[in-house]
Image (tube, rainbow, N blue to C red):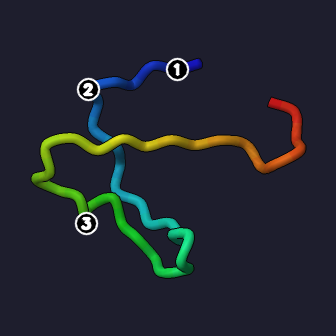
Amino acid sequence: MINLVGKKAPDFTAPSTSGADVAISDFKNKKKVVLFFYPKDNTPG
């Protein structure tokens, strides 16, 4: 696992659970943002 705590994330856009696109830049100037990624369901890793 890679620990990137405290590092700046590159700007990117991804779909939300509602289907709307969300950009990481939408959270600029927020105190803290947690990003969590996981592999596709039922895949190794």
Which residue type carries mark 3? Asp
The picture quadrant where one finds residue 13 is bottom left
The picture quadrant where one finds residue 6 is top left
- Where residue 7 sits in the image (x, y, percent)? 29, 30
Q: CA distance from mark 1 to mark 2?
A: 12 Å
Q: Mark 3 sits on what residue?
A: 26
Which residue type carries mark 2? Gly
Is 15 placed left or right of 40 in the picture? left
Secondary structure state at the residue bearing disc 2: loop
Instruction: Please report whichever mark, 2 or 3, sits nearer to the chain's N-terminal start.
Output: 2
Secondary structure state at the residue bearing disc 1: loop
As drawn, the label of residue 2 is: 1
Work out which quarter of the rendered image holds the N terminus and state it.
top right
Residues tagged 1 and 2 counted as in contact (Cβ below 8 A): no
Q: CA distance from mark 3 to mark 1?
A: 24 Å
Q: Mark 2 sits on what residue?
A: 6
Which residue type carries mark 1? Ile
